[in-house]
Image: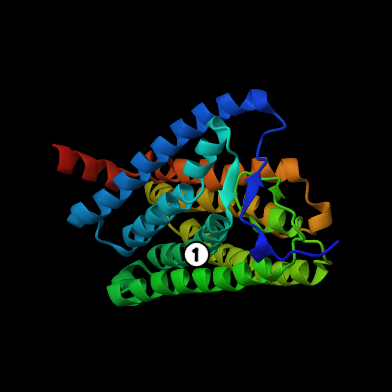
Amino acid sequence: MEEKNASSLTGFILLAFSDRPQLELVLFVVLLIFYIFTLLGNTTIIALSHLDPHLHTPMYFFLSNLSFLDLCYTTSIVPQLLVNLRGINKSISFGGCVVQLYISLGLGCTECILLGVMAFDRYVAVCRPLHYTEIMPPHLCALMASASWFIGFANSLFQTVLIFLLPLCGRNKLDHFFCEVPALLKLACVDTSMNESEIFFVGVFILLIPVAFIMFSYGGIIRAILRIKSAAGQRKAFGTCGSHLTVVTLFYGTAIYAYLQRNNNYSQDQGKFIALFYTIVTPMINPLIYTLRNKDVKGAVHRITG
């Protein structure tokens, strides 16, 4: 049989949850509600961070970056998924798949790095509070955020090119709800062990190095908090960092499961539900985690709406 390269395909059929048609309506309703809450929650964080002068700090600068990133991340996936869940046509064009992979992977990589940057910000805030504004000036915050976006999308460009250079031999049935690297690798009709090794190596750099940096930062934070004599001061310090640590655990735990394992050990069904969590659930609950116990955000809401 004559091999067909990926470029000869006009599009992909997203099987998603077609093997469980009874779930499609339930998923459509649940995901639509989640998407609306994601839009509202993250837009609120961005608006408050820009409108209230009390929130013009490095912490809320990075948090508004994270909220904007989550908005874009979810929007790159969910609208197409909702259309496929309720429509007869379950396909995505070849160009659409390339763009979706590039944008979603770029945003995911950026979030990995940005969460590490936010851990450094919390480390300075807790361990060097008297020098916080000197160590974290606005231009350095902007540089760190920009570097996170640049590295994330540079890696995504590299990964996207490598994936779509693989011959697919006419295979166009993607057993996933969006164009993601592990699922696309399964369509290749050649040995992908080199690609898997490269993805694993990059995954270690993008995922595990920030995790190690975050753990190191929080080791210093915990030691600093335990030296605080006031119980109220300890609670405030733990509250400042607890939200970020919760987000880190949720995001990295699911992303590491999806990307740091061999393709032949990758359960597609488990992968789909794990991907639902880190692409849809986590962006929705991030604003809740950061605001429910945050007096600064509650105060900003009262000042702006009052």
Whether residue 240 is visible to the viewer of this picture, yes or no, is: no
Q: Secondary structure at mark 1?
A: helix
In this view, the residue in front, 192 or 215, is 192
Question: Picture coordinates of residue 67 (x, y %)?
Answer: 39, 52
Question: Picture coordinates of residue 269 (x, y %)?
Answer: 73, 40
* Residue 261 falls left or right of residue 248: right
Q: Residue at x 72, y 68 (%)?
A: 166
Residue 27, placed above or below residue 283: above
Q: Amino acid at mark 1?
A: Thr
Question: Picture coordinates of residue 29 (x, y %)?
Answer: 50, 27
* Residue 41 falls left or right of residue 23: left
* Residue extending furthest toward the front: 2
Q: Quadrant of residue 241?
A: bottom left
Whether residue 267 is visible to the viewer of this picture, yes or no, is: yes
Q: Residue at x 44, y 31 (%)?
A: 33
Q: Residue at x 79, y 72 (%)?
A: 194
Q: Which residue position holds label 1?
A: 110
Q: Callout 1: few (<14), some (14-19), or many (20+) C-alpha neighbours within 10 Å?
A: many
Q: Quadrant of residue 6?
A: bottom right
* Residue 213 falls left or right of residue 295: right
Considering the image in quadrants, where does the C terminus appear? top left
Question: Picture coordinates of residue 92 (x, y %)?
Answer: 57, 49
In this view, the residue in front, 266 or 78, is 78
In this view, the residue in front, 88 or 97, is 88
Residue 287, placed above or below residue 25: below
Q: Residue at x 71, y 66 (%)?
A: 5
